[in-house]
């Protein structure tokens, strides 16, 4: 049965995040030929980004612009999105399983007295039903979920559901809605970006991750060079973060970021279960480790037994010659 589905878009520094387009793809599956309505909150003129959501498959987009929405706060964005949802009465809501998505959607779900399927990695229409796949037990297993009654509310893991191709011939209205934002108790003073090059790990296509085997902050330099030549970014295990070799913003795993890049190269990482929880869904995993018994080789598509300080420079040279 066709549905009206709202997609909550996400922008950062004036650009839509790729997961917004993936959420539109997901919403189009859930809507089953119904209407996909984008919502975008922020401050200033959001019409260009709203138009972009149309080019990626939203039937129409509602923007909510307000000085109080300049930076994300649960209270501000919660009020803005809730006001749109009240107007639209959708049968489905989709958002990215990002920091914002993880923060905003449970609050909305509780206000709407709805369930929520979080962190979906696949959505398929099966015999008239929509089936969501999501990881459980820290990624050791996957469960399939169906919502048989009420609102179909879900967050999707970045980099799993392919975004539609942009089509600039698609047309759809981009309208604005005024929402009075009241009693915000959170004041964002400053945003300090710690990630090495501004690439969000959860959306990176190539990640070169270092573990305790990297041995020092300087030991990360060859990994950064490999990331540069491959157009990727650097991540880390908690072992490396705890040892002070890099910032915790790079941590991947159960208590760090969950990533699904096309290519994950683990350097000097043993493959503890808590680390695997954040990266085992990567499309291609390459492990470099001195220890042939290291657990990381159990999830790797390609394993290199060797010293990372020999192997990584060789990889850099090979890639440079390609
Ligand atoms: P180690 O386990 O010490 O492994 C280092 C590896 O480097 C070894 O396999 C060694 O053979 C190899 N090595 C050494 N020198 C070289 C060399 N020159 N060349 C090649 N290989 C070399 N961990 C996470 O990563 N993310 C999380 O989110 C996370 N959350 C956790 C939550 C909880 C509640 C707990 C209890 C733990 C969590 N951990 C997490 C920690 C986790 O259990 C491991 O301790 C951690 O992942 C180990 O990091 P590591 O693989 O870098 O270090």
Image (spheres, rainbow, N blue to C red):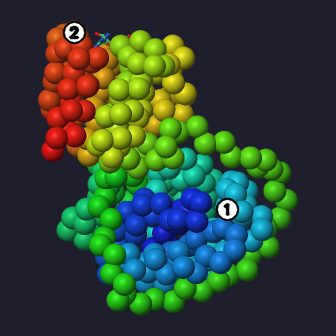
Residue nearer the viewer, 173 or 199:
199
On the rendered image, what quadrant is the C terminus found in? top left
Vertical placement of residue 81 versus 271, above or below:
below
Vertical placement of residue 303 versus 321, above or below:
above
In the rendered view, does 41 fall on the left or right side of 132? Answer: right
On the rendered image, what quadrant is the N terminus found in? bottom left
Determine crowd level at label 1: few under 14, some 14-19, many 20+ residues with C-alpha closer than 10 A.
many
Q: Residue 182 at what x, y percent from top left?
A: 83, 64
Q: Quadrant of ligand 1?
A: top left
| Residue for point 46% across, 89% down | 172
Q: Quadrant of residue 292?
A: top left
In the rendered view, does 55 fall on the left or right side of 313? Answer: right
**Residue designated by label 1:** 77
Q: Quadrant of residue 163?
A: bottom left
| Residue for point 30% across, 27% down | 266
Local secondary structure at mark 1:
helix
Determine crowd level at label 2: few under 14, some 14-19, many 20+ residues with C-alpha closer than 10 A.
some
Q: Residue 194 at what x, y percent from top left?
A: 58, 37
In the rendered view, does 58 fall on the left or right side of 87? Answer: left
Mark 2 residue's CB less than 8 Å from ligand 1: yes
Mark number, residue 268: none
Q: In the rendered structure, which disc, 2 or 1, sits on the residue that comes first in sequence? A: 1
Residue nearer the viewer, 29 or 127:
29
| Residue for point 34% across, 38% down | 227
One can see residue 201 in this view: yes
Mark number, residue 291: 2
Residue nearer the viewer, 104 or 276:
276
Q: Residue 257 at what x, y percent from top left?
A: 46, 37
Q: CA distance from mark 2 to mark 1?
A: 48 Å
In the rendered view, does 147 fall on the left or right side of 41? Answer: left
Q: Residue 167 at what x, y percent from top left?
A: 33, 81
């Amino acid at each position: 049965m066709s549905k009206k589905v709202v997609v909550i878009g996400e922008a950062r520094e004036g650009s839509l995040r790729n997961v917004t387009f993936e959420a539109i793809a997901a919403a189009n599956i859930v809507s089953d030929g119904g209407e996909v309505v984008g919502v975008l909150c922020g401050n200033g003129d959001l019409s260009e980004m709203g138009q972009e959501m149309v080019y990626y498959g939203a039937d129409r987009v509602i923007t909510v612009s307000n000085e109080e929405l300049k930076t994300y706060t649960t209270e501000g964005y919660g009020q803005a999105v809730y006001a749109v949802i009240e107007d639209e009465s959708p049968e489905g809501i989709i958002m990215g399983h990002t920091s914002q998505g993880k923060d905003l959607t449970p609050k909305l779900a509780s206000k709407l007295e709805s369930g929520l399927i979080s962190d979906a990695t696949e959505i398929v229409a099966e015999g008239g039903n929509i089936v969501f796949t999501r990881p459980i037990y820290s990624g050791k297993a996957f469960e399939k979920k169906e919502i048989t009654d009420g609102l179909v509310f879900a967050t999707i893991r970045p980099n799993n559901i392919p975004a539609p191709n942009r089509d600039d011939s698609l047309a759809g209205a981009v309208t604005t809605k005024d929402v009075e934002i009241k009693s915000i108790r959170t004041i964002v003073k400053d945003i300090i970006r710690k990630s090495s090059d501004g690439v969000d790990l959860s959306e990176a296509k190539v990640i070169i991750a270092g573990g305790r085997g990297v041995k020092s902050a300087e030991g990360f330099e060859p990994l950064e060079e490999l990331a540069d030549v491959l157009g990727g970014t650097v991540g880390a295990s908690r072992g490396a973060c705890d040892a002070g070799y890099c910032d915790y913003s790079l941590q991947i795993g159960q208590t760090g970021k969950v990533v699904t890049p096309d290519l994950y190269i683990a350097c000097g990482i043993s493959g503890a279960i808590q680390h695997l929880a954040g990266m085992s869904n990567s499309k291609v995993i390459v492990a470099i480790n001195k220890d042939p018994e290291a657990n990381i080789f159990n999830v790797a598509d390609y394993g290199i037994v060797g010293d990372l300080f020999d192997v990584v420079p060789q990889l850099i040279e090979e890639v440079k010659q390609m």
